Amino acid sequence: MVTSFKKYQEEYQKSIITPIDFWDHQAQHFVWRRKWDKVLNYDFHKPEVQWFIGGKLNITENCIDRHLPSRAHQTAILWESNDPAEPSRRITYQELAKEVNRVANMLKAHGVFKGDRVCIYMPMVPETAFAILACARIGAVHSVVFAGFSAGSLADRINDCGCKVVLTADGAFRGDKKIELKSIVDEALKNCPSVKTCVVLNRTKLNVTMRAGRDFWWHDQIKTASDFCVAEEMDSEDLLFILYTSGSTGKPKGMVHTCGGYMVYTNYTFKNVFQYKEGQTFWCTADVGWITGHSYILYGPLSAGATTLMFEGVPSWPDMGRFWHVVEKHKVNIFYTAPTAIRSLEKAPLSFVEKYDLSSLQVLGSVGEPINEEAWHWYDKNIGKGKCPIVDTWWQTETGGIMISPLAGITKTKPAFATLPLPGVQPAIMDESGRELTGNLCEGRLAIKFPWPSMARTIYGDHQRFKDTYFSTFPGRYFTGDGCKRDEDGYYRITGRVDDIIIVSGHNLGTAEIESAIDEHSAVCESAVVGFPHDVKGQGVYAFVVTYDPVHEEGHLRNEIKDVVSKIIGPIAKPDKIQFVSGLPKTRSGKIMRRILRKIAEGDVSNLGDTTTLLDPAVVDEIKRGAM
Ligand code: 7RM
């Protein structure tokens, strides 16, 4: 493990000069059935990437079995219910082994074998973790679909990879709501011919219809399943999972991750970024339906033998103090969340934070979008009490693990900077014409020059799209789709998606850049900027702005905001329209749905497309009514 900044610098140099030796060494720390013959094969033009070639392993032997001699009775998964009154559950490594094996045997009994795809559409309960690991145990490919997607989106994902089995639950609890998962699955399965079996966990006691021959109750199936199951021997490059991520155009992309490299990299980044110490409790608030949940609720922490907290609920229920209540209750040491959550909690009275003892916290993390300076400082001061390093971790579904991030307590942080690349990561900032910008101070598009072990290998069933999306913009390099600045210290600051560029009077403007300028106004909590058709300028700037307090003099505040933007970016970026809203339409993972805002800004509200993945669909109606 990297324990000082000097060691980081040495390790980074080693990883760049001799990447093969570096990763060969890292991979030694695992249980392999057979060692690899060669560390790496790659060609970024094809593109083709293979790590630990010829190696044989099973990731569950590394996440579970190997820990049994030393930590059978240690908690592996610490589960906190949506309902604060429901008892927490502690699943030890020994229990985890048994539960995973049971589910593995249940899947086998339904004819699931190595290579088959299994769709997991489940709430945030321990059984979902068992299901994911059970697939890995028998070499089935899991495709977790976040249990907030609509029937249509679910069906698309099931069909794209031809799942044989769907694992679901009667329903899911989310704050004061119940979501009828099984009826959504029923709707989806009308159009999914590949699905032969659906196993249903009883979580909410909702009434569901069970179709004879296809649908089975989890508790019935699991009763007869043995808790012993030999792990399937997998090749390093066999598929571990598929995870769908939305593209800027077209249908979602099924990102393919493989066994060996993903295991090595998520373990390495978990331990080093968070500086995980034996015995600590780690809480990542993401849903397991997203890559953050895969890598840093399950595979990273479990492969490191950590105690990982899994939370079923939401930050705002029963009140805005829930996260802090859970931190106190379980003495969480490392807390990893998204800026969107931080900003929403920042809006609540500070008394919700002050009520709780947060002294167990040692490290804070952020992921999913750029964290604005104000949120960073609030997090630092009120949650970390000025003594917990914040790791602002930049990465993607496609990268499998954290790529650019401080190492907690080791890398000097700067608000809103993801700081430096992790060992093994070779970033490059590219200009419009595809040239790499050298020297520290520069701004452009972020690409990666050299493979890392957990990178996605392809888009399931569409390698051409994989090549077109990620390896064609800058031939021979992986293109991230993000804009990025490097400062005088060589620190990286991710500025946002470059696919959200708007062109105003011939000037390219990044919507993310305008947003962060607007956010500098002390009355502004957060904002979203999109383009709209403008007679003279081509596109104008339309800003949706959330303020901390109700706005009394709109005209006055609009002028102030324009002045701030004008000051920070230039008069050209001044919003033409500023609409004050109570919230922004966001996906459950906290990404602003700009597609919807763009339509509203264009005055085209008749067909907003699929809004089923929104956290709160009601805000859309409010925004539509107030559109300018
Ligand atoms: C892990 C995850 C990926 C996109 C990525 C960025 C944005 C993620 C940060 C960030 C600034 C960060 N996977 N992003 N982390 N931007 N700073 N620390 O979120 O596939 O769902 O999204 O998220 O634009 O390309 S993801």
Image (cartoon, rainbow, N blue to C red):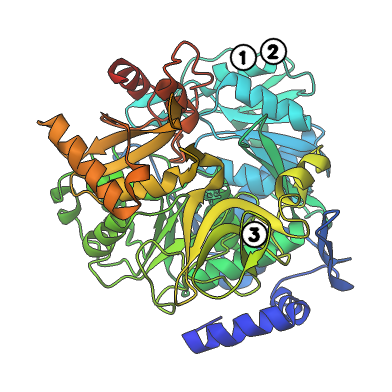
Label 3: which secondary element: strand
Q: CA distance from mark 3 to mark 1?
A: 41 Å
Residue at x-position 43% and y-position 42%: 511
Location of the C terminus (image quadrant): top left
Outermost residue toward the front in this view: 536
Badge 3 local density, few (<14 within 10 Å), some, or many (20+)?
Answer: many
Tag on residue 190?
Answer: 2
Tag on residue 187?
Answer: 1
Name the amino acid, label 2.
Lys
Location of the N terminus (image quadrant): bottom right
Say whether marks 3 and 1 touch (CB < 8 Å): no
Q: CA distance from mark 2 to mark 3?
A: 41 Å
Tag on residue 48?
Answer: none
Q: Is residue 565 above or below residue 169?
A: below
Q: Mark 2 or mark 3, which is nearer to you?
A: 3
Residue at x-position 50% and y-position 13%: 607
Say whether marks 1 and 2 touch (CB < 8 Å): yes
Q: How many marks?
A: 3
Q: Earlier in the sequence, mark 3 or mark 1?
A: 1
- The image shows residue 333 at horizontal and vertical percentages of 37, 66
Residue at x-position 61% and y-position 36%: 248
Label 1: which secondary element: helix
Residue 102 visible in the snapshot: yes
Dot 3 corresponds to which residue?
447
